[in-house]
Image (cartoon, rainbow, N blue to C red):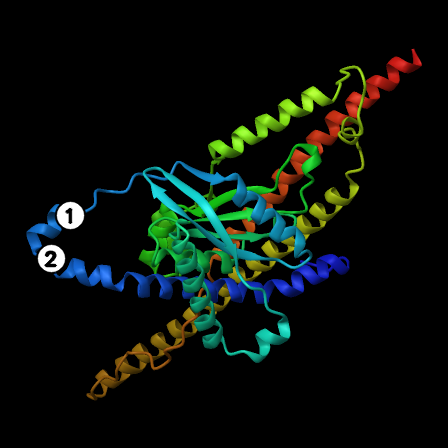
Amino acid sequence: FPHHDLIFREVYETKPDLRRKRISLSRATAAARDKMSSSSFAALASKPAAEKEKASVPETPPLHSVQIDGSVILQIAKHARDSQPSLVTGQLLGLDVGSTLEVTSSFPFPSQSSSENNNTNEDIQEEEGAHYQLEMMRMLREVNVDNNTVGWYQSTTMGSYFTEELIETFIDYAESIERCVCIIYDPTVNDSDGQFGLKAIRLTDAFLKTHKEVNGKFETSKIKDRGLKWSDVIEEVPMVVSNSVLVSAMMKQLDANADGKIERDENKLTEEDLNRLHLNANTFTTKSLEFLSESMDDLGSEQQKVAYYHRANHRLQQQKNVWLQKRKAENAQREKSGLAPLSEENPDTRTQNEPSRLETYLIFNQVNQYSKQLDEHNAMAAAKLKLVSSVRANEQQ
């Protein structure tokens, strides 16, 4: 994406470092979980075969929703807003219960500057990340907090999160966690408009199956045979916000106290009511259109790569066919002369590597995300404009 101004320049300059940190920390999570569960695996291996069959776990039901605690939402929002314009990430902890993934706690990953990332070896960062997560999980377990990893959260800007690094992180988590989600939080979404930039996403079962079968090589023929579409890569999981009984009771008590102390005038407009009619949506719309235009340019570049591959592969096959025809003609002459024919195996073993279509699929998803954002935001702006226009028309009459 282009560097439009200072804020967005800082965001996208720090994104590669944070992507590497997400990948290294996800691998560290896998190492930490393997280390913590090695004793349980050893105990299971020592059981008799009949006992293992009895202890076999039934097929896991499909994931229908993510139940997230209200305090976790506040932690994620505070972490992302306090660290702006830098992107942040953290760990999600909870329980996997039936068709619901419960997120009950979270903790942030330590952020490092770009100079620290350049001076530190990647293996050392992974080891430090694994040690940090083990210590955090150990301390949370000591205070009776759920310490089972169910995914991670990350912040984004203007809904730009469809990247290959996100897919790699999901694959790394899938090696140690059967089901995981990623909570995406966008602090640029205006909460006063009735929108909250929080969503839960996961890889679809069809994509995970295809990724395993093709070994991460998303070539056109392999994707076509399996019927994988761009909309089958990532899916959004419905979210349900839950609060403890004590928190719900406190909120009701606060509402009761406010009703008793404040006299409410239903005919009087407040400042919040006027803010809802704010019509200035040029900044968000302009940025979204610029990002959408950049994504379309990226899509054109990917199409050019595929077209170049087909042209180069066609030229290479033509060269091999010409060589084969010459060799066959030469062998025919040798047979007439009573000589042994030469081998018709082409010594030219060059091949053209087909570009992966995964990047194209991700760009399609990113374009779809920008289009949805523009549709939702402009629909609300159009409704406000129609309301204000009607009020002004009544005043003139």
Q: Is residue 221 left or right of residue 245?
A: left
Residue 207, how many percent across, how many down?
Answer: 39, 50
Residue 146, how many percent across, how many down?
Answer: 39, 49
Residue 5, how many percent across, how many down?
Answer: 77, 58
Q: Is residue 388 left or right of residue 70?
A: right
Displayed quadrant of residue 61: top left
Task: Relative to 396, say whether 144 is above or below.
Answer: below
Helix, strand or loop at mark 2: loop
Helix, strand or loop at mark 1: loop
Task: Relative to 138, say whether 386 is above or below.
Answer: above
Q: Amino acid at mark 2?
A: Lys
Could you tell me which residue is drawn at 36 percent across and 48 percent down?
Answer: 179
Could you tell me which residue is drawn at 47 percent across and 76 percent down?
Answer: 124
Residue 156 in sight in this render: no
Residue under label 1: 55
Question: In the orientation shown, which residue stands out farthest toward the top?
Answer: 397
Q: Is residue 146 left or right of residue 46?
A: right
Q: In which quadrant will I find the C terminus?
A: top right
**Quick one: label 2, few (<14), some, or many (20+) residues within 10 Å?**
few
Mark nearer the N terminus (2 vs 1): 2
| Disc ID at residue 47 | 2
Residue 394 or residue 274, whichever sits in front: 274
Residue 389 in sight in this render: yes
Q: Amino acid at mark 1?
A: Ala
